[in-house]
Image (cartoon, grey):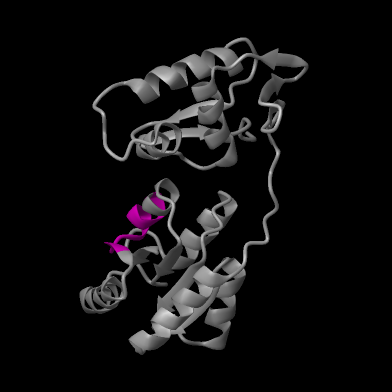
Amino acid sequence: MHILLIEDDPSTASYASKGLTEAGHVVDVLEDGKEGMVQAIQTPYDVLVVDRMLPGMDGLSIVKALRVAGNKTPVLFLTAVSGVDDRVEGLEAGADDYLTKPFAFSELLARINALYRRPSTSVEVTHLRVADLELDLLARIARRGDQEIELQPREFTLLEVLMRNEGRVVSRTMLLEQVWDFHFDPKTSVVETHVSRLRSKIDKPFDVSLLHTVRNLGYSMHAPRAA
């Protein structure tokens, strides 16, 4: 299991990450809330463990932002804030579970495992749509409005990954892994070249751009933001 732990207390972070690593999991640890949110958007995790009170961005704001962006990764709040109203507020913000400090590691591990085992309620997606751009995954056809767009196989896969992550930032590393199956940086402009070619087909002939570059982070597919 790949877990992101966002916790600014060094002793708590060390205690939890050490135990989770010994249990066979891969754990990334960040202490800044804003950095943690960016990491959660850029990297597909199985579970997020988030403190409520963090520098940079508090845990409640992190979860709200992730849910608005469409990120459905299970979230466990790990915090000293233990009032009933605080727990309700956290769960209503989009968290899936709540564990208060001090805690027993065995309970933390059990709760994380329970979140990971939750059955997915999603159904198989055969069509993707962003604004007037549609991708038929079965027929392997792309259309924007009433115009069919001819895509090479790699371009189709690239577009599929971007559309499946509508509204989220997809990093260059994620694209290398999911489109090219590279688990290393080839030190080439292969991503940038293919994004440019894709943009010339799905955006440039039309009035509204859907594929956006997010500086220093990656790319995002979304309809124009309301003014």
Q: Is residue 81 visible?
A: no
Residue range highlighted in magenta:
27-38
The image shows a total of numbered marks equal to 0
Figure check: 107 above or below 6: below
* Residue 146 in the image: above or below residue 171: above
Q: Is residue 159 left or right of residue 100?
A: right
Question: Percent position (x, y) of residue 8?
Answer: 28, 69
Position of 183 with respect to 197 (left or right) is: left
Q: Quadrant of the C terminus?
A: top right
Quick check: is 35 in the magenta stretch? yes
**Residue visible at 31% across and 63% down?**
26
Q: Residue furthest top?
A: 205
Quadrant of res 32? bottom left
Q: What is the x, y in percent for residue 152?
A: 54, 17
- Please tell me which residue is depicted at 51% across the width and 55% down the height of the picture: 66
In this orientation, which residue lies closer to the viewer: 35 or 28? Answer: 28
